[in-house]
Image (tube, grey):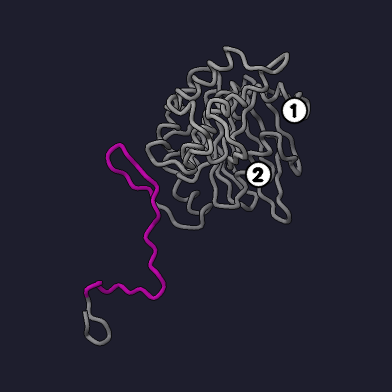
């Protein structure tokens, strides 16, 4: 296991202290101690079932850890009033389910609830925040659309806009790039990068694309699914050796000028031979 500490002299937006997570008989994370500071973008990576969603839920305060604690801005999650916590931490869950017809703008406005007062009606500032969030992701033209008419990728981008609209400096995003084509994956990560740099903000997101993570994240937390993990600067964590061990398949790093990518290594299949594909078969046929 490895961990990295940054900004030791200021209170981080999020911190885990000796955090242990279990799911049934499985131990997913053992004694994770890590600070997540403003200005950082963390990718949580690991194979299916490694514990990414469980970890994000625990960091958000939706799941009780088996041991350890989580702090937001130096205060234990249990000591935060729910509404006040929602003003400081926003969560985008992995799945979006819409039971009723509603416009995109009204759906995004739901995330302004922690900021409402009185009778709970949205004001001009709330509506402006919703439109700004849609504009950040290039969704201005979607404001009047019915969420039930959206494709999976469009709905995912609306969910991300809703998380941004919440106005919290800490975003916890579970698979925010799911269902998105490459163009929109890059556009969303570029928007999140600008969002983090604009104020004292931080993002944690789970992702299966290690190359996008290496390009846009500043740090990575790689889970091996057996309790172990590596945490630190993204290119020190998402190495061919560590990623190969975590995902159970050999990966190699290829470079082309200033560009590099992790790709699956070629592994001989069972029964393959070194003969040419054009060599004759057992009966002499090509």
Q: Main secondary structure of the magenta part?
A: loop
Q: Which quarter of the figure has residue 63?
A: top right
Can residue 286 be seen?
A: yes
From the top left corner, tell me how far across and down residue 250 is, in percent.
Answer: 44, 56
Residue under the image location 22 percent in, 80 percent down: 280
Queried whether the magenta region covers residue 25, the answer comes back as no
| Residue at 58% over, 47% down | 223
Q: Is residue 148 left or right of residue 30?
A: left
Taking depth in this image into account, of 17 and 146 the one nearest to the observer is 146
Question: Considering only vertical position in the picture, is 14 above or below 149?
Answer: above
Q: Camera-side residue: 216 or 242?
A: 216
* Residue 234 image position (x, y, % from top left): 48, 37
What x and y, as percent, mark residue 69?
Answer: 74, 35
User: Quick check: is 262 in the magenta stretch?
Assistant: yes
Q: Secondary structure at mark 1?
A: strand
Name the image quarter holding residue 68: top right
Kindly report which numbered mark, 2 or 1, lies closer to the viewer in this rendering: 2
Q: Does residue 129 sit above or below 31 in this rendering?
A: above
Name the residue nearer the viewer: 249 or 77.
77
Residue labelled with disc 1: 76
**Outermost residue toward the bottom in this view:** 283
**Quadrant location of the C terminus in the rendered image:** bottom left
| Mark 1: few/some/many CA within 10 Å (<14, 14-19, 20+) | some
Q: Using the rendered view, name the quadrant where residue 215 is placed.
A: top left
Q: Earlier in the sequence, mark 2 or mark 1?
A: 2
Secondary element type, mark 2: helix
Q: Which residue is mark 2?
A: 54
The image position of residue 154, as x and y in percent, is: 47, 37
Magenta-highlighted residues: 253-278
């Amino acid at each position: 296991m490895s961990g990295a500490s940054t900004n030791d002299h200021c209170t981080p937006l999020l911190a885990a202290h000796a955090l242990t997570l279990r799911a049934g008989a499985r131990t997913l994370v053992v004694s994770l101690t890590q600070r997540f500071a403003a200005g950082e973008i963390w990718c949580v990576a690991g194979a299916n079932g490694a514990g990414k969603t469980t970890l994000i839920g625990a960091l958000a305060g939706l799941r009780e850890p088996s041991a350890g604690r989580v702090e937001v801005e130096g205060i234990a999650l249990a000591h935060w009033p729910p509404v006040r916590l929602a003003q400081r931490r926003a969560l985008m869950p992995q799945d979006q389910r819409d039971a009723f017809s509603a416009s995109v703008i009204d759906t995004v406005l739901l995330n302004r609830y922690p900021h409402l007062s009185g009778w709970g009606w949205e004001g001009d500032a709330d509506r402006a925040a919703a439109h700004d969030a849609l504009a950040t992701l290039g969704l201005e033209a979607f404001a009047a659309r019915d969420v039930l008419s959206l494709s999976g990728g469009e709905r995912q981008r609306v969910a991300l806009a809703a998380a941004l609209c919440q106005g919290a400096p800490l975003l916890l995003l579970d698979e925010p790039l799911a269902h998105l084509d490459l163009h929109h994956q890059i556009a969303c990560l570029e928007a999140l990068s600008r969002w983090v740099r604009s104020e004292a903000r931080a993002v944690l997101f789970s992702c299966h694309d290690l190359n996008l993570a290496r390009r846009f994240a500043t740090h990575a937390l790689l889970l091996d699914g057996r309790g172990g993990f590596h945490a630190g600067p993204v290119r020190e964590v998402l190495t061919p050796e560590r990623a190969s061990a975590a995902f159970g398949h050999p990966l190699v790093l290829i470079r082309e000028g200033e560009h590099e990518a992790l790709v699956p290594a070629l592994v001989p299949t069972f029964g393959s031979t070194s003969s040419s594909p054009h060599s004759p078969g057992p009966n002499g046929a090509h």
